[in-house]
């Protein structure tokens, strides 16, 4: 391939990028990035320093040194499994439609044409993982030996290593046309092996990567093998780009274009649906169980029928969310307060997955409004089947918390708190889903003309309020931790926390039931106020 062909390709991409971005001033863009980094980083550091968690004792330090690498390595094992499945399903690349239609079918060398998209994909994944690892690392450095700066650097190194391994593994799996069942089997085998390394203290496949994350405390030269392997796998994936499937690229290009638009519009429901299509996730043709005959009301029957057709991948994902929520709650008990944020995210995601009957109803507002029942009543009845379906996942969360704490004294408080916490945490997903429902009390003109300041506040509330609800659901664990510290009964504290979680879930259900009614009253009040103001101004 001549350099002229490459020059034409690069020129076409530059022109398309310039057309997409418009006449943007790069100085303004750099200034915005600077402000985001300054205020975002400052906010993270301020929140981290304001959480006055105590430094761990010598026994805990020894336990972290013994189990930390294997435990952290589970993250890398999960990334490896996700990469295998992504590659088997046509990932990880997602080109623009023009690239798939014209560039991939042109005489341009496919490896050279795909080199830039691959580098962009690996760079974005590594950047996100590095920032996440650095945030978690500096939090760990405030309780463990070593400085927060050193822990942030080691966390970033671990994140980059895991991200590069993910990108390279996905490229290799895609190039060799790895069947999905083999990808899932190999990924699960690696994950089970790593979990066995945690349980029985045997060498695990991701122990070196987990040990690299602890370089903020101590350094082992052998840990450098992990990033070396990640780079080698990525190079192997780049070398196999010639075998990239055009059919997979064509399918993913249209879906990713829609996904980016949905993210821009903050349409979380559409994002979830498109992600499921990218992962080729379909509901089961044969349900796990038939709807019991004693359930005669059509709405609960529809809910049970929807839940009974959840695919295996979604059930596995929900199990992982529940287990991680339990682990995070156990870490809060052990004194790591920021783990509460992890619990909130896991419960929020669990709620989004479980509330599929509610989501399907919200997705079809015309049919909902045509039914002879008030919309709030209809939506709140759709909460029953998912709430029952969350019971086994509450048991998973409780088991994960007990195993992480490693004491039988935690059984009773955990059993009391598990189900109320999971149900109330899933209420954050309910808030997110119902907020996306069309507002029948608001006209089109009111939706179109919104002051920028109010639009910004509305966007912030749309994103932050559901997570805040899930965080409130996870907060009762702080009552149990305080009871442990002052020597009072943890069981009584768990009962009080469970009552609070139940009240939160009931409040969200009441909001779903009365949301439209309250909005009509509020808008009527505002309309009366505007009319009164106009009458006064004419006098």
Image (tube, rainbow, N blue to C red):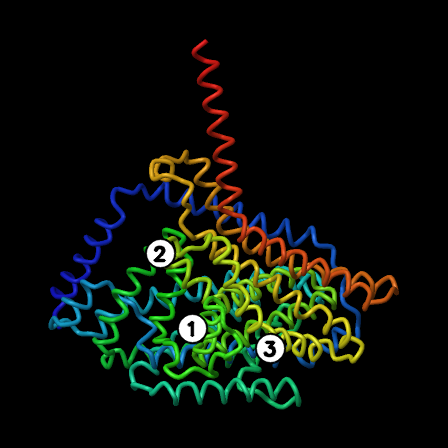
What whole-number distance in Å separates the C-alpha atoms at marks 1 and 2? 27 Å
Is 518 placed above or below 524 here?
Answer: below
Q: Which residue is mark 3?
A: 392
Residue 385 visible in the snapshot = yes
Label disc, if present, on residue 164 of the rendered structure? 1
Left or right: where does residue 323 sit relative to residue 317? right
Task: Name the secondary structure under disc 1.
Answer: helix
Task: Name the secondary structure under disc 2.
Answer: helix
Residue 32: image location, x then y, percent: 42, 43
Residue 300: image location, x then y, percent: 50, 69
Is 374 placed above or below 228 here?
Answer: above
Q: Residue furthest right?
A: 487
Q: Earlier in the sequence, mark 1 or mark 2?
A: 1
Left or right: where does residue 488 sit relative to residue 517? right
Q: Residues within 10 Å of mark 1 (few under 14, many from 20)?
A: many
Q: Residues within 10 Å of mark 3 (few under 14, many from 20)?
A: few
Tag in front: 1 or 2 = 2
Q: Earlier in the sequence, mark 1 or mark 3?
A: 1
Could you tell me which residue is drawn at 56 percent across and 79 percent down?
74
Q: Nearer the viewer, residue 357 or 239?
A: 357
Could you tell me which residue is drawn at 84 percent across and 63 percent down?
485
Tag in front: 2 or 3 = 3
Tag in front: 1 or 3 = 3
Label disc, if present, on residue 262 of the rendered structure? 2
Cβ–Cβ under 8 Å for marks 2 and 3: no
Q: Nearer the viewer, residue 98 or 124?
A: 98
- Dividing the image into 4 quarters, which one contains the N terminus? bottom left
Residue 342: image location, x then y, percent: 60, 64
**Residue 480 in which image quadrant:** bottom right
Task: Name the secondary structure under disc 3.
Answer: helix
What whole-number distance in Å separates the C-alpha atoms at marks 2 and 3? 32 Å
Left or right: where does residue 326 sit relative to residue 24? right
């Amino acid at each position: 391939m001549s350099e002229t062909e490459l020059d034409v390709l690069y020129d076409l991409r530059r022109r398309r990028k310039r057309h997409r971005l418009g006449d943007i001033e790069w100085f303004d863009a750099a200034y915005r990035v600077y402000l985001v980094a300054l205020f975002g980083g400052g906010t993270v550091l301020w929140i981290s320093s304001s959480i006055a968690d105590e430094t761990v004792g010598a026994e805990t330090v020894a336990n972290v040194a013994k189990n930390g690498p294997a435990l952290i390595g589970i993250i890398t094992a999960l990334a490896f499994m996700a990469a295998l499945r992504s590659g088997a399903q046509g990932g990880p690349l997602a080109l623009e439609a023009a690239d798939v239609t014209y560039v991939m079918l042109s005489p341009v060398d496919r490896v050279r044409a795909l080199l830039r998209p691959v580098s962009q994909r690996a760079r974005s994944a590594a950047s996100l993982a590095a920032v996440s690892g650095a945030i978690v690392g500096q939090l760990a450095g405030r309780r463990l030996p070593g400085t927060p700066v050193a822990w942030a650097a080691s966390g970033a190194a671990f994140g980059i290593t895991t991200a590069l391994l993910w990108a390279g593994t996905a490229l290799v799996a895609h190039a060799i046309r790895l069947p999905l069942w083999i990808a899932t089997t190999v990924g699960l085998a690696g994950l089970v092996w790593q979990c066995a390394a945690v349980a029985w203290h045997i060498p695990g496949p991701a122990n070196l990567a987990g040990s690299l994350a602890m370089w903020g405390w101590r350094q082992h030269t052998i840990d450098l093998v992990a990033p070396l392997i990640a780079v080698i796998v990525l190079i192997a994936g780049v070398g196999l780009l010639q075998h990239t499937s055009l059919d997979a690229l064509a399918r993913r290009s249209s879906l990713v274009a829609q996904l980016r638009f949905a993210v821009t519009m903050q349409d979380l429901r559409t994002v979830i649906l498109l992600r499921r299509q990218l992962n080729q996730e379909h509901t089961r043709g044969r349900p796990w169980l038939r709807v019991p005959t004693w359930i005669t009301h059509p709405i609960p029957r529809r809910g049970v029928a929807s839940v009974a057709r959840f695919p295996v991948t979604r059930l596995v994902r929900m199990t992982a969310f529940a287990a991680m929520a339990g682990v995070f709650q156990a870490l809060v008990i052990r004194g790591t307060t920021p783990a509460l944020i992890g619990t909130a995210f896991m419960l929020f995601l669990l709620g989004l997955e479980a509330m599929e009957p509610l989501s399907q109803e919200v997705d079809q507002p015309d049919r909902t409004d045509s039914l002879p029942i008030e919309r709030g009543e209809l939506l709140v009845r759709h909460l029953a089947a998912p709430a029952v379906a969350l019971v086994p996942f509450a048991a998973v969360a409780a088991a994960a918390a007990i195993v992480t704490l490693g004491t039988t004294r935690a059984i009773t408080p955990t059993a009391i708190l598990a189900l109320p916490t999971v149900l109330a945490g899933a209420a954050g997903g309910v808030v997110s889903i119902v907020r996306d429902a069309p507002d029948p009390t608001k006209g089109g003109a009111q939706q179109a003309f919104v002051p920028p300041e109010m639009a910004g506040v509305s966007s912030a509330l749309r994103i932050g309020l559901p997570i805040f609800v899930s965080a409130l659901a996870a907060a009762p664990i702080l009552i149990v931790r305080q009871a442990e510290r002052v020597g009072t009964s943890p069981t009584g504290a768990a009962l009080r926390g469970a009552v609070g979680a139940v009240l939160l879930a009931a409040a969200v259900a009441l909001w779903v039931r009365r949301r439209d009614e309250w909005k009509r009253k509020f808008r009527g009040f505002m309309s009366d106020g505007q009319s009164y103001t106009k009458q006064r101004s004419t006098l």
